[in-house]
Image: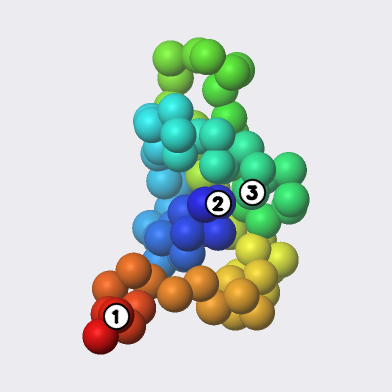
Amino acid sequence: MPMELLRDMAAGPFPLTLASENAIDKLRVLKAAGMVLAWLPEPGGAQPAVVQELTGLGRASLKLREVPRPEAQALPG
């Protein structure tokens, strides 16, 4: 989910390089939504993406959504 990637990137440091095609696809969504400033390679390209920073909108979205970390979820009991 793109919001989980945004949460993971929030701690920095920046610039951050992402090489995984899956992560780059999620980053495309975040950039289109105005949540990150990033350089993205052409689709299918071999170059990594570079994230310069999270925007104010990206940080505010994280605070509003409070996406839970997997380790913080309650176990079924």
Callout 3: SS: helix
Rendered view: 27 above or below 35: above
Q: Which mark is residue 30?
A: 3
Q: Which residue is pictured at 55% across the width and 34% down the height?
A: 25
Binning the other alpha carbons within 10 Å of mark 2 as few (below 14), some (14 to 19) or many (20 upward) gives some
Q: Quadrant of the C terminus?
A: bottom left
Give the mark nearer the N terminus: 1 vs 3.
Answer: 3
Q: Which residue is pictured at 60% across the width and 17% down the height?
A: 42
Single out the mark in the foreground, 1 or 2: 1
Q: Is residue 20 left or right of residue 10?
A: left
Q: In this view, does 20 lie to the left or right of 2?
A: left
Rendered view: 48 above or below 63: above
Contact (Cβ within 8 Å) of mark 1 with mark 3: no
Q: Spatial distance from mark 1 to mark 2, Cα to Cα?
A: 26 Å
Where residue 39 sits in the image (x, y, percent)? 59, 34
Callout 1: SS: loop
Q: Which mark is residue 2?
A: 2
Front-most of 71 and 55?
Answer: 71
Single out the mark in the foreground, 3 or 2: 2
Q: Which residue is pictured at 56% across the width and 22% down the height?
A: 41
Binning the other alpha carbons within 10 Å of mark 3 as few (below 14), some (14 to 19) or many (20 upward) gives many
Residue under pointer 1: 76
Give the mark nearer the N terminus: 3 vs 2.
Answer: 2
Where residue 61 sits in the image (x, y, percent)? 66, 70
Type of amino acid at the residue the image marks with label 1: Pro
Callout 2: SS: helix
Q: Residue furthest top?
A: 45
Residue 22: name its quadrant. top left
Front-most of 49 and 68?
Answer: 68
Give the mark nearer the N terminus: 1 vs 2.
Answer: 2
Q: Spatial distance from mark 3 to mark 2, Cα to Cα?
A: 7 Å
Contact (Cβ within 8 Å) of mark 3 with mark 2: yes
